[in-house]
Image: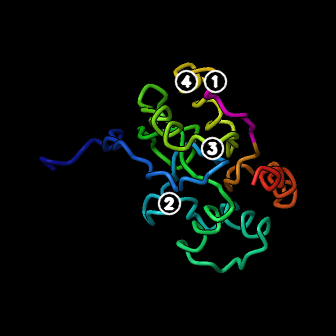
């Protein structure tokens, strides 16, 4: 028992880090999440949780096979001039829930550099409220006013956001096809 932790103590939560953006020079739209969940971090892929509806929505919107592999899914986005990234570069979070992100631990991605490399992006669609809040509070004040794209929040595709059905989420997300 010399090295055991008391039952009330929990091991420290580690800092997690997001992925590089999926974007090419022709991107006109950016879809922005908050931070990948545990399933995504383990898989090394955006929206890897089997119950997250993001990829299902994308394949329906762009009339693609829902069984596409990850590389083909990302190609689907770039072929429609869509970039994908997260607001946070890193943070401390004890679960996959955005509500568990320790606010003081958030390090934001470098959007000034991203937008300078992707000047054709005119719209940002937030995948839920946390991504929007992080961007508006921590990114927007750092951008030059003439470089700020249109900003739109969409309902989260997370399985934790169960107040809307898949079809309701799909209908809301149809707006991104106009931007393509």
State whether residue 127 is above or below residue 56.
Answer: above
Toward the viewer: 20 or 148? 148
The residues tagged by marks 4 and 1 sit, at their Cα atoms, a distance apart of: 8 Å
Instruction: Decide which of tag 3 and tag 1 comes sooner along the chain.
Output: 3
Q: Secondary structure at mark 2?
A: helix
Residue 101 in the image: x percent, y percent? 50, 36
Disc 4 target residue: 143
The residues tagged by marks 2 and 4 sit, at their Cα atoms, a distance apart of: 29 Å
Instruction: Decide which of tag 1 and tag 2 comes sooner along the chain.
Output: 2
Disc 1 target residue: 146
Contact, CB < 8 Å: mark 2 with mark 4?
no
**Badge 4: how crowded within 10 Å, few (<14), some, or many (20+)?**
few
**Badge 3: how crowded within 10 Å, few (<14), some, or many (20+)?**
some
Residue span colored magenta: 146-153
The residues tagged by marks 1 and 2 sit, at their Cα atoms, a distance apart of: 34 Å
Q: Residue sitting at 35 percent across and 42 percent down?
A: 15
């Amino acid at each position: 028992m010399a090295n055991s932790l008391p039952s009330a103590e929990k091991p420290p939560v580690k800092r997690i880090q997001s992925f590089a953006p999926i974007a090419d020079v022709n991107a006109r739209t950016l879809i922005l999440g908050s931070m990948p969940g545990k399933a995504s971090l383990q898989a090394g892929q955006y929206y890897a949780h089997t119950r997250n509806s993001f990829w299902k929505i994308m394949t329906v919107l762009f009339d693609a096979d829902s069984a596409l592999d990850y590389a083909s899914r990302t190609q689907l986005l770039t072929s429609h001039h869509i970039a994908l990234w997260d607001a946070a570069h890193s943070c401390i979070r004890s679960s996959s829930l955005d509500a568990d992100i320790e606010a003081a631990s958030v390090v934001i991605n470098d959007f000034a550099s991203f937008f300078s490399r992707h000047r054709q992006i005119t719209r940002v669609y937030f995948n839920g409220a946390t991504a929007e809040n992080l961007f508006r509070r921590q990114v927007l004040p750092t951008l030059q006013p003439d470089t700020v794209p249109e900003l739109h929040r969409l309902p989260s595709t997370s399985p934790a956001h169960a107040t809307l059905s898949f079809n309701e989420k799909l209908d809301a997300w149809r707006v991104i096809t106009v931007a393509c």
